Every structure is written in C-alpha cells, then in structure tokens.
Amino acid sequence: SELGRVYHSLSGQVRTFGHNCTGICVCIRTQGGDLNVNPACPGGGHSDGVISVGFSSDGKRIVSGSRDSLVKIWDAATGAEIRTLRGHSGWVHSVAISSDGTRIVSGSDDGLVMIWNAETGAEVHTLTGHTGPVYSVAISRDGERVVSGSADELVKIWDVTTGAEILSLGGHTGEGLCLCTVDEDGDLEEDEDGKPIFHPECPAGHSRFVRQVAFSGDGAQVISAGDDQTVRFWEVATGRRGRQLEGSE
C-alpha cells in the first residue's frame, strides 16, 4: 500500500519508517537510496488510520496514534509491535516520547492528554481541562513539562510528575480572565469593530483551533500554531505572550 510519510530517527540507527491508512511499518533504506519494506513488517497493528507517529531519541522505539483510539509502541529495528496503550475513546491525533524514553504523551479527540510509562505501558496521569479535541502534544527536553493544543483554542502547560495544570494560555473568546483597558470615565475602550481593547500584557490566545505546539530547545518558550493563521510565542515561566507571526489570507 502507499507509504504516507517517511521519518528519520535522530540517532540514525533506524533507516526510515512510514505509515499508511491501515498501519505502521519499518522500511530499510538501501545504499542506493531505495526503500524496501522490512520482511518482518507485521502488516499493520492498528485497525484504522494512523495519524501520528514519533521516534524515541535513541531511535529504538516508535510510538503511533490512530483513529482506532489506540497508542502503540513498536521496535524500530524489526517493526515488531511491543505494546498497546488503551485509555482514549477518540482519535489519537498526537503522540510524543520524552528524551529519556521513559514517558509517552498522547492527545485525543476525547479532550484528554494522557501520560504513559513507556516501559510498562501503565497510565501515569490523565490530564483533564481541555473542552475540545487535543490536536497536538509535546514534551520539554528535560521531561518536566508537557504542552497541549486543542480545538478549544487553548494552549495548556502541565507538570509531568504531578499531572497538574500549570498554565492555560489564551481564552479571550472562551474560558479565562484578562484585563481590559478603560477610558477616563471608567468605560471599556473599544476598537473600531466595537471589541474590547485588552491590556498589552494580556496573553491573547488563538481565536480558532490550535493545531500544533512545540517547546523551544531550552524549554523556556512554547510556540503554537492555529487555524487563525497565527504562530504565537509564550514564556513558559510566566505565560506571557511573546512574538506573533501572522499568515496571509
């Protein structure tokens, strides 16, 4: 069947892998650059489309998330399925593995972010707080924080050890509280469209679905991208909004 995507491990130990509409498989890149399916390919362990994949930093494990609501761990060298993680009740849109390989994080249509023990497959934490599907998750390099982005237009930062929500970024049009500016008479100041003018320090969030999130290398910033055609920068320590990149119509 047609190969959907091709990825490379950071270590270079695994040549490449990809996923299609029914499963995931390891492929071998020959010296000539051709891709051959590994004979040990299990033919797909998911029962529906695979929509998210990730490599462990050592290149030994692959994790996949699927429309069948399952998260699976695979041996990257042989393609053998190692373990199935059950807990979500909707499509698993995003998966990530901590840099030390001990934790897996997944985000789903069910609005949950789940943290798993990568060795045993046990559920460590189920993070609740989003009110819409979770489209993207990421783990900081030090493994201490998780960030998630959702259809509820919010970006949330979580503590990996305790499972506590640390920050919720955004929320002008939904949940959340923010300072607005007022005029000399104490009335709310409005822009030309009649909308309140928010304080410059207010962490203005996305106005549509948040599709992708990521940590900076040093873990000090989070970036998020949404259907509102913006990429937003956030300070992890304070939640303050940083730069904003805007797309065109």
Image (cartoon, helix red, strand yellow):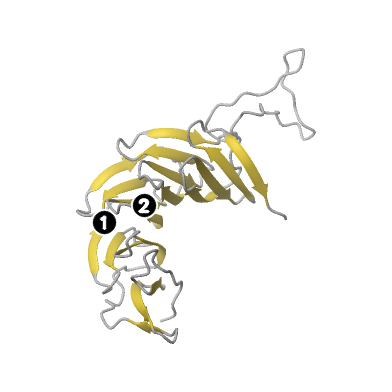
From this viewpoint, which residue is outermost toward the top?
185
Q: Indicate the secondary structure of the residue bearing disc 2.
A: strand
Location of the C terminus (image quadrant): bottom right
For the residue pair 53 and 44, the one nearer the viewer reads as 53
Label 1: how many Cα within 10 Å (few below 14, some 14–19, many 20+): many
Mark 2 residue crowding within 10 angstroms, few (<14) / some (14–19) / many (20+) = many
Q: Which residue is drawn at the image coordinates 37% and 84% (left, top)?
A: 36
Q: Position of residue 48 (x, y in %)?
A: 36, 68
Identify the residue position indicated by label 2 in the image: 106
Residue 208 at x, y percent in the picture: 59, 46
- Residues 127 and 80: in front is 80
Q: Where, quadrant-wise, is the N terminus in this rendering?
A: bottom left
- Amino acid at pointer 2: Ser
Name the side, left or right, on which 201 lies relative to 72.
right
From what the image shows, is residue 49 above or below residue 240?
Answer: below
Q: Residue furthest left?
A: 120
Q: Residue at x 51, y 43 (%)?
A: 222
SS class of the residue under badge 1? strand
Q: Of marks 1 and 2, which one's residue comes earlier in the chain?
A: 1
Q: Position of residue 176 (x, y in %)?
A: 53, 30
In the rendering, at what x and y percent does residue 200 appear?
66, 29
Rendering quarter of residue 63: bottom left
Give, as a three-letter code, the residue at label 1: Leu
The residue indicated by pointer 1 is 85
Evaluate if marks 1 and 2 touch, with contact meaning CB atoms under 8 Å apart. Answer: yes
- The residue sitting at the right extreme is 192
Residue at figure coordinates x 43%, y 85% from the top left: 34
Measuring 19% from the left and 53% from the top, which residue is drawn there?
Answer: 120
